[in-house]
Each structure stands twice: as C-alpha cells, then as structure tokens.
Image (cartoon, rainbow, N blue to C red):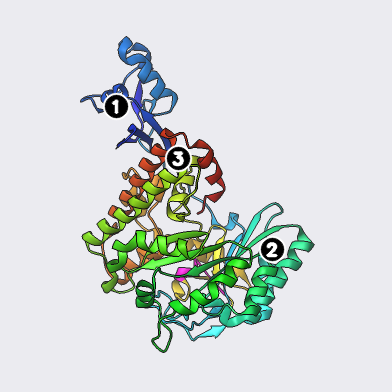
Amino acid sequence: MQYQWADHQIFAAEEGAILFGVEQGSLFVIDEETRELLARPGSSGACDPDLAPPTEREILQGLRDIRILVPAGMPGGVAPLVFDPAEFPLTTLVLEVAQDCNLRCRYCYADGGSYGKTAQLLDPALARQAVRSLVQGAPDGEKLTLILFGGEPLLNLEAVRAALEEVAAQREASGKQVLVSLTTNGTLLTPEALALIRRHRVSVSVSMDGPAEVHDANRRSTGGEGSYASIVSRLPALLEAGGTVAARVTLAPEQWSRVEEVFDHLRGLGFHEVGIAPASPVTRGFLPEPRHEKELLQGFAALAGRFVQAAARGELLPFSNVIDLLARLHQGQTKAVACGAGYGYLALDAGGSYYLCHRLSGEDAFQVGTLGTGPDAGKIRSSLAQVTAGKDVFCGSCWARTLCRGGCHYENHLRENQLGLPQGSSCSFILAWLRLGIKTYAELRGNGCDALLQLLENRIKC
C-alpha cells in the first residue's frame, strides 16, 4: 500500500530534533537517523514502508504508526471543522459591571473603560439577571465561568455584590459549578471589597505592569498621577484574602526589553502568577519595530529557560504564558477555532447587550443580542464571518494553523480594519513564540519532568 507524507515540521533542539505533526498537534523527539530520512531529497514522494530497504523500514513503519505517513490519496490537510454557534450554550460570561474607570491607561483599548459609549454602571438587578441567565441556560454538568470586568469593576461594588450573591444562590439551587474571577486595577480594594472577595472565594487578576517606573508610565489616574503606590499598599490585604491573585501585565513596545525585570518584581511582591502581554496597537504609535519583537522574545525565552531549570528542581515557575502553552502542547490540543468567542463565550456590557467578546464590546458590528432576548445565533455567525473572512485561505498552508487558527479576532480587526495593515502582520511573532514553546516542551520531556507537565493539564484555556 502506498503512503504519503502528512504535513509536519522538524525543529532543532538541545535534545536533538523535534517532529511536529501539524494536524494532530503531536510532538516526538526523533533520532538523527529519522531526521536524515525525513530531510533526504526525494523523501517527500509516496512510498510503501513494508517494501522499503531494511535500514529504513522500521523508521517508516514507526512514522506510519504516528500518522506522519498516511494512505496515499488523503487530502494534504484536514479542513477546519465548521461549528454552529447555536449548538454552544453560554458557559463563560464576561460581565462588564462598570463601563467606567478611575485610571486612564495609555494603551487602553476600551476608551477609559467606556468602550466608546457613554460611561455607565451595570444595575445590580441586571447583574443578578445575567447570572441567572448564565446558570439556568447551561446544561447540567457544565463548568461555568463568570468574569467580573470593566472598566474598573470595583467602581460598582453593589453590582459586584449582587452578582456574587446570585452566584451563591444559583450554585445552591442548581448544583452547578460556577467559577468567578475579578479583573481589577487594584486601586479600589477597600475592606468591603476584600470581604466580598474572601467570602465568595473569587480569583483576582490585578492589572499591574511591574516596577513603579514601568507601571506609572502606563497606568495613571484621571488626574495624571501614577497608580503603583496605591496598588502596592493594598496588595498585602488582597494576598491575605486567601484566593489566587495573578498579575496581568501589559507592556508598550519600548518596555519589551524589561520582561524578566517585570516578572521578578511582581513575583517579589507576592503574586501567585504573572502573565505578560504586549499592548494592542490601539494607535500606530504602539506598533512594534522588529527590534522590539526580538527583545520580547528574548525575555520570554529567558523565562522559559528558567521555567525548565525550576522544573528540574521540582518547582513551578509561575509564568502563565509558558504554563498555558505547555499545557496545550502536552495535551496535544489543536484548535478548531481561534478562540471561544461566540462558541459559549460572550461579553455583556453595562447596558445589557451581548458582544462577541469583551475586547470587541462597544462595536455595533459585534453586538450579538441582549440580556432580554438572549444571544442571537444569527448575529454571532455574522460577526464570526466578519472577523474570520479569508483566514482559512491565508492560514491554510501554515505549519502552526492547528495551534493558532488565525490569532485573536480583536487584534486582527484592529490591525487590518482600523490600522489598514495586511493580514498576517503579527504572524512572525506568533510563530516564533510557538517554536519557543515546542522547544521548551522537548527540554522538559528530556529532563524527565513528566509529573510537572501532568499537573498543567487543567490549565488549558481557549
């Protein structure tokens, strides 16, 4: 029987070479013999492993067993699955309890928390209704997630309280599991807010960008004052509240060279985990130069190397960027869609309108229903069609397509529709980051860190 090569990539690593099966998201460390066979001129043609010379037969049979060799005539790539949003009940809701903020961060994509609309606070009664709709509309056995968001959600403590009380009531009435998190700038963590967080076991993400010099350059109050000191003074009480507290970092391109410094500073403040993101190019001034991307990758690579060193000691370095990517690679999780937006994941603004995701909130083209009428599957289909148009063709031959599926809808919309950049303007960084993740994973496997990798499986995110 004739076989052909499935789409695959080979990456060099300290442990040798890594073979990546594109469609399955499979990873294998291969020996030099296998690497040479795969790289040999003419090796891309059809073959029959059982009729190969004895020196090659075992290798080819092994590659057939792991589906790098597939029966001849199979399509070169597997077409992306097509899903109907109507088949996905809402299970993750980003609830914008406050479309307003007491800070004016220079890279804010939400226009100071208002998302381009009139600043407003969510009515506590609507907060309760939103929670009931989430819990009662989901099938039994589903794990539900409520994210209290803004703007700055603690500007509207009454709506936060109402949502948390309703979650407790619905958990008791339905028996469903509802996980709750809060994203805050950390300046309004009053004793009353901390009591709510403690009582309802809320996980908290604090938007904080590192040392005072870095943070205050980004995140200032409406009066122009830096916010670092205000957050640091409140952080010990938050950490004592007993829940998970993560730092949510956003850095402008000129700060990308300081990734390690930022991570170490925030870890030193006591954060349980640190995640670092480049600022979205909300204006052309935030578009990076190649040197900025190089600096960011160098910082990420340094932390990935430290992650491997810590793992060898039986420790987990709490750098969530690496943790989440390694968890996906370990699970062999490929993506059928870029993210969960529209497929069980929506945002609800303070006026009671659903949007495809929280980052597209306020944009009329991505408004997909109301709390009163429920999510509109037709509008969700239309919004998804708009943000994914052309991606299947553009991404079809990319080796990372099953790990990426085109990237963040909001980032693409921002770059391509608002700034007029060509498709793929962020691809080089994404590909370099995925290569780094694959090499890091191979190092962990080579160092015998399987037990630690197993712990990461619960970390997989959309």
Callout 3 touching callout 2 (CB < 8 Å):
no
Q: Nearer the viewer, mark 1 or mark 2?
A: 1
Q: Residue at x 42, y 47 (%)?
A: 307
Question: Which residue does the numbered mark 2 point to in the structure image?
Answer: 135
Q: Quadrant of the N terminus?
A: top left
Tell me where residue 198 sits by quadrant.
bottom right
Q: Earlier in the sequence, mark 1 or mark 2?
A: 1
Q: Earlier in the sequence, mark 3 or mark 2?
A: 2
User: CA gap, disc 3 to disc 1?
Assistant: 27 Å
Q: Which mark is residue 35?
A: 1
Q: Position of residue 321 (x, y in %)?
A: 43, 54
Pick the front one: 374 or 229: 229
User: CA gap, disc 1 to disc 2?
Assistant: 51 Å
Question: Which residue does the numbered mark 3 point to in the structure image?
Answer: 312
Q: Which mark is residue 191?
A: none
Relative to 248, residue 458 above or below: above
Q: Amino acid at mark 3?
A: Ala
User: CA gap, disc 3 to disc 2?
Assistant: 42 Å
Span highlighted in magenta in the image: 353-360
**Total marks in image:** 3
Q: Amino acid at mark 1?
A: Arg
Taking the image as shown, residue 270 lies to the left or right of residue 293, namely right
Is residue 103 magenta-colored? no
Relative to 181, residue 14 above or below: above
Q: Earlier in the sequence, mark 3 or mark 1?
A: 1
Tell me where residue 354 sits by quadrant.
bottom right
Q: Nearer the viewer, mark 3 or mark 2?
A: 3
Q: Position of residue 142 (x, y in %)?
A: 66, 53
Q: Position of residue 2 (x, y in %)?
A: 36, 20
Decide: few, some or many residues near mark 1? Use Cα within 10 Å; few <14, some 14-19, many ≥20.
Answer: some
Relative to 337, residue 258 above or below: below
